Amino acid sequence: MPAFLSKHSSILIIDDDINLIRMLSEILKDFGRILFANSGEMGLEVARQQKPSLILLDVAMTPMDGYEVCRRLRDDEVTRNIAIIFVTANTGMDSEIACLDAGAVDFICKPLNPLVVQARVRTHLRLIHDSASLELLAQRDALTGLYNRGYFDKAIDVEFKRLQRHQLPLGIALVDIDHFKNYNDTYGHIAGDIALRAVAEALQLATKRPGELVARYGGEEFVVLLPQVDASVLAQYGQLICDAVRALQIPHQASSCAAHITISVGLSIEIPHAESSPKDCIERADRALYHAKESGRNRYHIFSDS
Ligand code: GH3
Ligand code: MG
């Protein structure tokens, strides 16, 4: 079975004719989880709660018709991006245009032809699956598979605001591989790429608490978002990732600080407030990283004003 036809797909059928719901459920039973609602009101509620992959929406319902349901789905941030296919008995061009103008991706005419319904739904589930895959791909760094800088920049903005609202601390770790230029010069760029991947994986494995996020910040630098940590947990984390990379035991004969690959880590922690910004948090971690490098590398340092 193709990946887009799976138990992860769900289809919501909104129709006030229970026989039609039954018929569509039977036609689409192998396409994913089938949800249904027999009124526009109920459909809006289910859509909000379950966030289905696709909605099949009857046009002629009372008291709220399909166009109105569609408009409300589009107005709601939670349901805005769910694909909608209208199911309509009106086959005229005006009706087709009205369906598409209302924001539907397609329409299916009654009486229902099972093969046509399946073909249309299959097509849209595939499109939804492909665009979700592209979106996931756009968040990732191609070499390491970690989140990329663009994704991290958005994530830290969201997290900063959330923690500011709750007055909880935000920790940041900036991680930089020591003497990595020398590593490339000694072992070659391909070996450098392999080492980068290994370090990325070690960081990911060591970063386990809910809400924590590891990203490749650029080059041989990584960044970790550590929501709701205190200073002692942050220090433990700094030590943990230094140890984890050391434990990889990747030989590095051109390093001044060890016989194998090591990292330096800059840590910062603060409760976000109106006068600060995510950029300030990163800057503090960057200054701490500079300090760790200056103090001999292969260590972590926590930012403090002094
Ligand atoms: P320091 O200990 O001060 O951090 O020294 P460094 O040599 O690690 O730092 P520098 O900024 O001088 O060099 C970083 C090196 O990282 C240079 C660059 O070629 C390498 N690098 C960046 N991205 C990649 C990558 O994707 N693959 C490989 N193989 N190397 C990379
Ligand atoms: Mg470096």
Image (cartoon, rainbow, N blue to C red):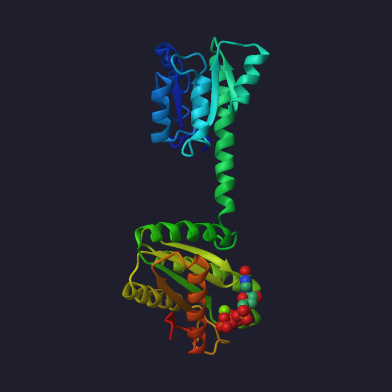
Instruction: Say whether residue 236 is visible.
Output: yes
Q: How many marks?
A: 0
Point out the residue furthest to the front here: 275
Instruction: Say whether residue 1 is visible.
Output: no
Q: Position of residue 150 (x, y in %)?
A: 58, 59
Q: Is residue 15 above or below residue 126?
A: above
Residue at the image point whose x is 42% and y is 81% from the top = 304
Q: Position of residue 297 (x, y in %)?
A: 49, 85
Residue 280 left/right relative to 127: left
Depth check, front residue: 124 or 57: 57
Q: Is residue 122 above or below residue 186?
A: above
Q: Position of residue 215 (x, y in %)?
A: 51, 63
Residue at the image point whose x is 57% and y is 18% from the top = 108
The image quadrant where one finds ligand 1 is: bottom right
Depth check, front residue: 236 or 283: 283
Q: Position of residue 34 (x, y in %)?
A: 42, 26
Residue 109 left/right relative to 158: right
Depth check, front residue: 247 or 25: 25
Based on the displayed image, in which of its 4 quarters is residue 120 positioned?
Answer: top right
* Placement of the C terminus among the 4 image quadrants: bottom left
Residue at the image point whose x is 40% and y is 70% from the top = 270
Residue 125 left/right relative to 17: right
Point out the residue furthest to the right here: 93
Based on the displayed image, in which of its 4 quarters is residue 168 positioned?
Answer: bottom left
